Image (cartoon, rainbow, N blue to C red):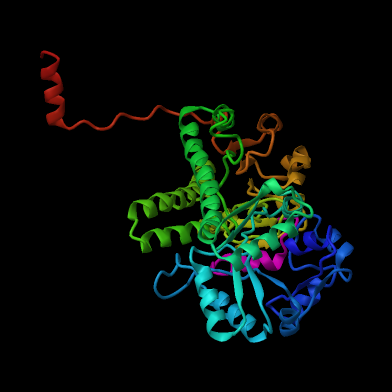
Amino acid sequence: MLLPNIAHPLSHRGTGSPSQGTRTARRWNSTLLPFFEPSLQETLEEVRGVNLSFATDFDAAIKSADVIMASVSTPLKDSGAGAGYAPDLQFWERIARLIAQSAAGPKTIVERSTVPVKSADIIKQVLAFNNPHPMVVLSNPEFAREGSAMMDQASPERVLIGGEDSEAARAAVEQLVDLYARWIPRERVIVSGLWSAELSKLAANAFLAQRISSINAISALCEKTGADVSEVAYAVGVDSRVGRKHLTASVGFGGACYETHLRNLIYLSRAFRLPQVADYWEHVLALNDWQKRRFANVVVSSMFNTVSGKRLAILGVSYKKNTSDTRNSPAWDICRALLNERAELAVYDPRVSQQAVALGLRTHEKAEQLLRCEQDAYLAAAGAHALLLLTEWDEFKLLDYTRIFESMEKPAFVFDGRNLLDHAQLRDIGFHVYGIGKPLHTLPTEIVAPPAPPPVAAEQSLHMIKDLGA
């Protein structure tokens, strides 16, 4: 996302060299980008072919560059030591070797991807052993949010640049600071040590994930006590020490960053023999998984303890609005749980393709028989017993829910996993509505009995009688 913003306000020339090859480069040079991001296409149209280009000649791109911005995939290892938690750095080593082969002079390599602490050491060692020219490695982690990345890059809250304490590194840091200063106020540019910069991005995402899990934990308590999580979150958030952002209860966090970076942090903590730190962050992950299971369980228990053979409309499968990204989306876990109950799922998402939905649920043996995608929300809802709102797309607030109610089986349920809709209005229409952390409203025909006291053993009863003076 950074290249279009660098090219847009500056005279600097940028060349993107997609690692996936010619096919991906063609898509970046077209109107069919590899993914959806608001305003990205429009910005590219202004600078592409002017001072921004996408090429597949990696060797030429490296030779002509002064600064190399490296955005390289850092997935979790899926096998071997640390599988599921340890970062797989094979792509970083590979890109370092390619740079070493192609660089014909001094270069500044900037880590843009989120990497574990000390990753720069790997890059520096590979470069030093395979290229005679002096190289400097900086860390400049990406803080832009999917769905608002272009705005975040145009006016970021901060830019973090980390480098070593050497003359060459300080000069490279200043070069990068000057580049950003062309459109970003200097006071927003933070300069730190190399390891501090690498750790800061992991810590930032861990803190954000923790806030989501914290408010989701409170949402469960709200449902048991009759409190409203939105009111609680507001009362907590007005405290300036806490703040109001990221205190929205939901079905849980998703995306490529939070879970991956939490697992990296857990792995690092264990590697440095800090089990208490690792356990703390592990609980943030566990709470998120529990929240998704809890939502799926509420769907089943509310619908007379069975969804077998019932059509359920799934509104949204991207992990958040304004993106087509479905990686680690809470929707997948919820859908899998409902497919296990043999529910029939009708999926609609305004930006996620049918192929992506099929890919997201490809591992479920019942998906082919019980899953279908629809072209709009009304088709998904037709004949459904329930609506499950799993992504907070703005268009879902504008739907004609009276029309939807009339097309559904009765009783008609709405399970709002994002607290996006007007629940009182939906109840007036006739829906039975469940919201995350909201007071429960039972069906008119339901009679809810108070919970029975736990059984008392005979010996305990005798002691109770004696205590009463019998």
Quick check: 129 above or below 291? below
Quick check: 80 above or below 41? below
**Foreground of the two, 407 or 395:** 395
- Residue occupying the far front of the picture: 167
Q: Is residue 442 visible?
A: no
162 in magenta: no
Span colored in magenta:
349-367
Q: Is residue 107 visible?
A: yes
**Foreground of the two, 389 or 255:** 255
Where is residue 441 shown, x and y percent of the image? 56, 30
Image quarter where the C terminus lies is top left
354 in magenta: yes
Answer left or right for 278 relative to 179. left
Where is residue 428 shown, x and y percent of the image? 69, 29
Answer left or right for 440 relative to 452. right
Q: Residue at x 37, y 30 (%)?
A: 451
Where is residue 196 shown, x and y percent of the image? 52, 56
- The quadrant in which residue 124 appears is bottom right
